[in-house]
Image (tube, rainbow, N blue to C red):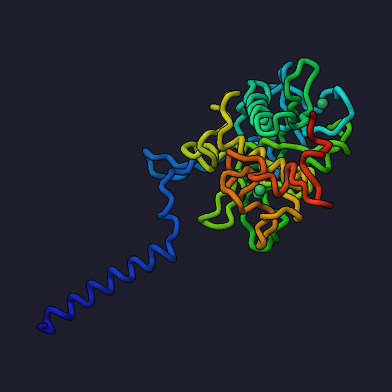
Amino acid sequence: MHRYFLIPAIIIFLIIFLLVIYSQYFYVDWKWTFIPDNFDTKTETYKEKILPDICDDENTAKIIKQNREISNKRSYKDRPDISSSPTIHAVYFLPCDGEDRKFDINGNIHSSIQSINNWFLDKTKSQIISFDTTSNNLIDVTFIRVNKSIKWFTKFNTLENHNKDTSSKIEKIILSNQNLFNNFENKKFIIFFEGWEKRISITNKVCGRSRYNGKVAIFYTNGRNKKLKSCTKDNIKNSNIEVFGESEQTILHEMLHTLGVPFKCGKNINPEESLHVTDSDGDIMNKVSGSLFLDYNNDDYYKHNIPNCPDLYMSKFLIN
Ligand SMILES: [Ca+2]
Ligand SMILES: [Ca+2]
Ligand SMILES: [Zn+2]
């Protein structure tokens, strides 16, 4: 080949090669196709986001009440309990700058939890999860808004260790406000947080979080911007009682983790992290939260007949 052709060809090849390297490794943002909420598409500039006065990211976390959010259907603390037996209590939890989508009073949380128990009864034939309810049989949801912004909940700081992620911050606020709840020792919590989990990597999309055998499970009801309202396709906003959708699968999966499910003594526990079962990806406790089975083959956590191994069937948080 003639060298007057070869030299430009090599140069062009090198330029393309460098551009590809640059876009892959240095300018990662190009992978995001969505437009941030505060981006003005007309002027093509970022509007500075002004935080409401109630926000205070500097001082200690506090629960705040605003007159305009008060409604006689809404409760800022746990309503009187019907019994003192163990229950899971629901909380609608908002950062100071989160939009109030009224999930606590418009029936969204209630119907989501109803559909979880419909599914649970269908799988067990005899049991449901014991939720804290009101005297007229609605899910008792507590409304909590805190003085911390979504930025505070999700800020990335390399100096912060893993314990300071979004979910740990939420958990800490719940645990340090025990006075809001009756019968606290016998309760676990499902939090519907109007925000999202801090992203650890580009591939990591967290829809729910919980502490194994802990007190608090969290479901993230919002996304980074308007086009990405939730990390699940069927945000609870559109749910109805008949649908056991992706959101409900995540919510149930996280709540079961707080009940210690799956147990380490199960037959098909993932040996790497021992938090999920591996025998079927249709299993609710598979790492992808399936929707078909509550313990596929009954050999891990429900009615498994393994000697000296706990069984969800015997949990105090279930009602026969
Ligand atoms: Ca209650
Ligand atoms: Ca199984
Ligand atoms: Zn899990």
Q: Relative to 226, does residue 204 appear above or below in the rendering?
A: below
Q: Position of residue 199 (x, y in %)?
A: 58, 52
User: In the image, what residue occupies the spot 79% across and 40% down?
Assistant: 174
Q: Quadrant of residue 129?
A: top right
Q: Quadrant of residue 111?
A: top right
Q: Quadrant of residue 14?
A: bottom left
Q: Relative to 297, does residue 65 appear above or below in the rendering?
A: above
Q: Position of residue 116 (x, y in %)?
A: 65, 31
Q: Position of residue 33 (x, y in %)?
A: 41, 47
User: In the image, what residue occupies the spot 78% across and 30% down?
Assistant: 130
Q: Does residue 73 appear left or right of residue 198 in this picture? A: right
Q: Does residue 86 appear left or right of residue 217 in this picture? A: right
Q: Relative to 84, does residue 165 appear above or below in the rendering?
A: below
| Residue 139 visible to the viewer | yes
User: In the image, what residue occupies the spot 79% across and 20% down?
Assistant: 134
Q: Position of residue 244 (x, y in %)?
A: 58, 31
Q: Relative to 134, does residue 28 appear above or below in the rendering?
A: below
Q: Does residue 38 appear left or right of residue 102 in this picture? A: left
User: In the image, what residue occupies the spot 61% across and 53% down?
Assistant: 278
41 or 31: nearer the eye?
31
Q: Quadrant of the N terminus?
A: bottom left
63 or 135: nearer the eye?
135
